[in-house]
Structure formats: C-alpha cells, structure tokens
Image (cartoon, helix red, strand yellow):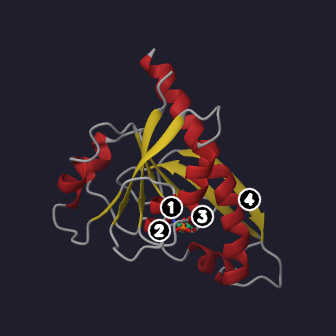
Amino acid sequence: MKKLQVAVFISGRGSNLESLIQSSFKKQSLVEVQLVISNNSKAKGLVIAKKNKIPAIHFISRKNFETKVSQYLQNIDIICLAGFMQVLGTKFVRNWRLRLINVHPSYLPAFKGLNAQDQAIKAKASYSGCSVHYVTSKIDSGQIILQKKVKILKKDNTESLSKKILIEEHKIYPRALQMVAKRLIVKKK
Ligand code: GRF
C-alpha cells in the first residue's frame, strides 16, 4: 500500500519534526514525511530535514503564504504543524479539514496560546501535558486526537516542565499521526 504523504510545517528547533521523521522510517508506518515547510530561514529544523534528505522550503514573507505553499502540497495527504508559529488563514484551514494537525504543549483545553508551559507554572497547576489536535480556525481548539498528562512538581520551573512535556510530545505526535492516517485510509475505502 502506498504510504500517505506528510508535510511538516516548522518555525524553529524541529525536535517534533525529527520524531515524526524517525517514526515514519518504521516498517509499519502508514506515512512518509515528504516535505518540510518553514517560515523561518534560520530554523534548526531545516538542518534536520537536510540530514534526512527531505526537501525543505522556506517562505519568509507572510504575504500570500498559503497560496504560495499550496503549490507544493498537491501530493500531500496530511499536514503536521510542529512548532509552526504562524496562524494559517481560514480558507486554508477549511481546505485541510481533518488533514491538518498540531501539537500543543498543554493538556488542552487548559493553557491555550503562547507560552503554555509558563502559563501552567504561573497558574500553579498540579499538572499540564501535551495534546495533538486537529487544527480549526479557533486557536488550539480543534478536536483532540491524543493527549498526555505531565505532573508539575514544586521544584519545576518553565524550563524543566517544558523538557518533561517535550519528551511526551515526541511520543504522542507520531502515534496521533498514525491514527489520523488510519482514519483517512478507512474513509477512502
Ligand atoms: C513544542 O513544544 C510544540 O508543542 C510547540 O512548539 C514547540 C516546538 O518544538 N507548538 P520543536 O520545534 O518541535 O522542537
């Protein structure tokens, strides 16, 4: 069976990109990471793409981003946002409904938006976590695909919590991607 083709959108470090790529190499994987798109020419994730011989493109300007990017997405089945720090236009999001997913560093619906780990520490929450969800036009509000809780200890700060959450992100994001791929394959049949 032909694997589903995935594009990963990044803006920075790319550690989730790396975990998605590595898991896609597994024999039983239903997906293949075919393309990396960045809105930042200095994103470290671009180096990860290169190292893994995955074509990567960067678009610096926000203007017509969606139109420009769409030309490269003709053969793509699923888009994964992985630390992509740009809000996508409503039309684009609607066109990719159920095929566009994101990882967020909190146990949604708590702590939506920027600096989610810091929000959790400041709120003195007893736990936070991470969530993989479908993207809708409302930020961090689409249907949850997978989530994992992470305990917050008294000694935790934003940095230590971010590290603990990231470890879990790297586990749930590839699993959630397989789930989405499976749902799409079943739908096509
Ligand atoms: C992750 O914490 C992700 O949840 C958030 O941005 C961070 C990206 O990290 N959306 P990386 O670029 O995947 O290393």
Q: Neighbour class for label 3 at 10 Å: few (<14), some, many (≥20)?
A: some
Instruction: Tell me the amino acid under the disc marked 1.
Output: Lys
Instruction: Tell me the amino acid under the disc marked 3.
Output: Ala
The earlier-in-sequence mark between 4 and 2 is: 2
Q: Residue furthest top?
A: 189
Q: Going by the image, does 80 lie left or right of 156?
A: left
Q: Secondary structure at mark 1?
A: helix
| Residue 181 locus on image (x, y percent) | 52, 33
Against 54, is 122 above or below? Answer: below
Q: Secondary structure at mark 3?
A: loop
| Residue 57 locus on image (x, y percent) | 31, 60
> Distance between the Cα atoms at labels 3 and 1?
36 Å
Q: Going by the image, does 88 lie left or right of 104?
A: left
| Residue 140 locus on image (x, y percent) | 47, 58
**Residue 125, quarter of picture:** bottom right
Write down the residue under mark 1. Answer: 51
Write down the residue under mark 3. Answer: 110
